[in-house]
Amino acid sequence: MKTRVSDLFQIKYPIIQGGMVWVSGGKLAAAVSNAGGLGLVGAGSMKPDLLKHHLEKAQSLTSKPIGVNVPLLYEKAQEQIETALNCGIKIFFTSAGSPKKFTNFLKDKGCIVVHVTSSPDLALKCEEAGVHAVVAEGFEAGGHNGRDEITTMALIPQVKDALKIPLIAAGGIVDGRGMLAAFSLGADGIQMGTRFLMTKESSAHEKYKDLLIKSTPSSTKTLMKATVPVRMIENQFAKEIMQLEQSFHGEELKMKLNEHLGKFRAKNGMLEGDLDNGELEVGQAVSLIKSVPTVEEVFQELMTSYKAALEKLPRI
Amino acid sequence: MKTRVSDLFQIKYPIIQGGMVWVSGGKLAAAVSNAGGLGLVGAGSMKPDLLKHHLEKAQSLTSKPIGVNVPLLYEKAQEQIETALNCGIKIFFTSAGSPKKFTNFLKDKGCIVVHVTSSPDLALKCEEAGVHAVVAEGFEAGGHNGRDEITTMALIPQVKDALKIPLIAAGGIVDGRGMLAAFSLGADGIQMGTRFLMTKESSAHEKYKDLLIKSTPSSTKTLMKATVPVRMIENQFAKEIMQLEQSFHGEELKMKLNEHLGKFRAKNGMLEGDLDNGELEVGQAVSLIKSVPTVEEVFQELMTSYKAALEKLPRI
């Protein structure tokens, strides 16, 4: 399946596994790359030692290219980037910060740089900063979310019209139908997080996967808009956020939200299975997912459902 | 372009023009039906006499089928339905209320009934109520909006999996790329509002169309979630709503919002061109629209861009 994105990374399918905090370690990234996509280790807020462990693990499990996703909002970002460079990583997806910060530095070292964005304006800034490609991520995506709430349907054609570089669509894509829709809108490749979270190889806690299998189309909410918007499962932790959002405003709300978030909420929830008090980041389309297969099976199902959807399209 | 939706209405293209308050009168509906789609007169909060005027106007301008959209949340709904029946209308799109309310009544009179919904659960209730088809409308759609904020990408495949009857996708579709994406996700037809609002034949005020040409991807917001969520342009009226939403909660907020909305805001804004104090309902993808062509030109452009997008799809 040849597109500008499969060419850029020299991979069989233009399918990227999104970097997800505490969920996409070395095992998942390697499985995705082995299946013909591009696996990313999600650096999240990992300390350099742990990141090194996951990158080396991925490299021990595959000879195919793997990459790293570094959210630039954490203080550790620079150290994480240096750790990844020392491990020989050549593919960097940066997010949640300015694309100007590390793009030239990484390109000078011969790396491929992709930045994740949530609006056509910001996508244009990525192109101007010299990245090789962008991920444009719609409002339906899990985890960190854009402030303008632009959905994938509205976002992708506008980014396509504004940019010359390859475009990877994200947000709401979990099967071949979604993949075909993304290509219809003008994408050159897709990134999926939630679909890969729900595989045998992801490090999400089993209890978390079980909860997600039972999710409904209204199970997620985008909350914490006063600080950094995040799409998450509406569990007890999220309900407490909604309570704060009803009771406070402005600077006071920001302080209360940061206090409530505290530390390790995402780790406690997604990795350790505290379904009530943890932060459970996931995309809105999670309720389309009915099983927890292997990564290889996900790729097979994607190709089957893509082909079926393609054949059913009305011709003129 | 043959699908279950074009068969249902006996039309050339499975393309519906969404009923829009103050914007989709007889002239627009007739133009859409003449171009090979299905035009709907938006009854909105029209008094029966005005509705009769628009239906008769549409009938005088086309011999093709036309329909009416009746939002069931207004007191006048029953009277509007009787008016439309007296005019010989045989196609009813109902919305913003229970599909049980009029479906059997209308089917007994030989009418085709479609209900507009915003979630897979509600879509299933429509099917159970006996409607012929549903419109599933994503979060990116203009005007009245679902409480669960389910986007078109996440919504359409889930409605498709849950229902047997024909499915019309709405929300974020303004060109052939969006149309192709909707079919990819499993739709049998599409409904567009904003794209037809931005035509020469719509009754939207010229100043409103001029404003929309300059809109950006972040120009709309979904507001009034405490009462009935509506996607609208973030103008002065909308900013005042946001102020109320920051300052009040619960029953007090509902009261303040209803007071602020008052009467005629939509008419003043969209029909009469009061861009500051009127309510300007429109979809998020409006910023993809760069011109105000005729309806016939919209259909030509749709077919051209659909074909181009279809040819570009990666094959396996």
Image: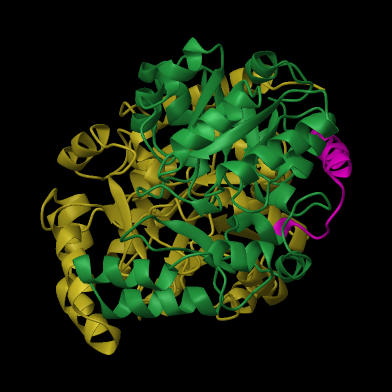
Chain colours: A yellow, B green
In this rendering, the answer to whether B141 lies above or below B286 is: above
Residue A63, percent across and down? 51, 42
Nearest the eye: A274 or B94: B94
Residue B233, percent across and down? 57, 67
Is residue B162 toward the left or the right of residue A2 in the image? left
Which residue is painted at 38% across and 80% down in the image? B243
Residue A35 visible in rendering? no
Residue B197, percent across and down? 71, 52
In this rendering, the answer to whether B247 lies above or below B143 is: below
Q: In which quarter of the image is residue A248?
A: bottom left
Nearest the eye: B220 or A110: B220
Question: Would residue B290 be counted in the magenta stretch?
Answer: yes
Which residue is painted at 61% across and 48% down in the image? B20
Is residue A262 toward the left or the right of residue B128 in the image? left
Number of numbered tags placed on the structure image: 0
Residue B59 visible in rendering? yes
Nearest the eye: A34 or A75: A75
Nearest the eye: A196 or B22: B22
Is residue B219 toward the left or the right of residue A311 in the image? left
Q: Quadrant of the C terminus of chain B?
A: top right
Q: Which secondary structure is most common in the magenta stretch?
A: helix
Magenta range: B288-311
Most distant residue in the front direction: B49
